[in-house]
Image (spheres, rainbow, N blue to C red):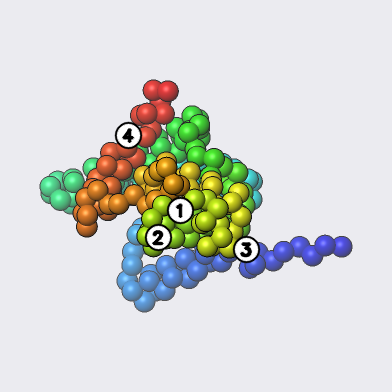
Amino acid sequence: MPRTPSILENEHARAIGGLLAVVSILVVFGGMSAFTAAYMLVLIGGIAAADWLVDARELPDETSQGVYGVLVVAAAAFVALTSSGGMPAVVAVVGLLAAFGGWTVLDAYTAFRYEDDDTHAFLRGVDDDGTEAMLRMQTMNAVNQELKNADGPRTPSELADALDMTETRVEPALSYLASKGHAERVEDGYRATPPRWGRLHPVVAFARWLPRRVLAPARRLRV
């Protein structure tokens, strides 16, 4: 007869239990109010409980993100209700929390309802296989570093030999790097794309990425 797993063996249960212990200590020895303690349990415990439910019921990954957004909106309401007066700083914090929470819920819903069909082939089929996802990321990083260290273009075959990999592993990684602007295809193979903005390249890349990420829910709704 198979052994029934103990609840203590569940990482989500241990996380919730640890949270209960910490909050209890803060209430007893730190003077935390019961209202604040209850809200901490709802906010942080809610995230852990949502992750537990997602794993147990095999719910969509976006479920956790949606619950997180709802809890952030609840945090905004908590700050508004427990703060005295309408200080500009408080209003700004409440507004930012509410906006971020609402955006998170909308992003989770649109990602689930209108799945992006432009996912690169290199990233497909790894959602339920953590080992394969890690292997692909390691392959991509190794190929990217090898291109950066090379003194000229490299073919997939040359990269495969240098990294002791198969071409079937290297080629999708090269295609993905090229699609993200980290590599470019030339006549003699592939080469690393030189930073267009020098040392400011990471900052510029982030500044270009952020608006696209923020507007992603609206873009999905228009499709």
Residue at figure coordinates x 49%, y 38% from the top left: 119
Earlier in the chain: of badge 3 and badge 2, it is: 3
Of circles 4 and 2, the one toward us is: 2
Q: Quadrant of the N terminus?
A: bottom right
Q: Are marks 2 and 1 in contact (CB under 8 Å)?
A: yes
Of circles 1 and 3, the one toward us is: 1
Q: Is residue 210 above or below residue 198?
A: above
Specify the quadrant of the image occupied by residue 207.
top left
Query: What kind of element bears circle 4?
Result: loop
Q: Position of residue 165 (x, y in %)?
A: 59, 59
Q: Report whether residue 143 is seen.
A: yes
- Residue type indicated by callout 1: Arg
Mark 3, residue position: 10
Q: Which mark is residue 154?
A: 1
The alpha-carbon separation of the residues under discs 2 and 1 comes to 8 Å
The alpha-carbon separation of the residues under discs 4 and 2 comes to 37 Å
Mark 2, residue position: 150
Earlier in the chain: of badge 1 and badge 3, it is: 3
Q: Are marks 3 and 2 in contact (CB under 8 Å)?
A: no
Query: What kind of element bears circle 2?
Result: loop
The alpha-carbon separation of the residues under discs 1 and 3 comes to 47 Å
Using the image as rendered, state which of residue 95 and residue 104 is in the foreground.
Answer: 104
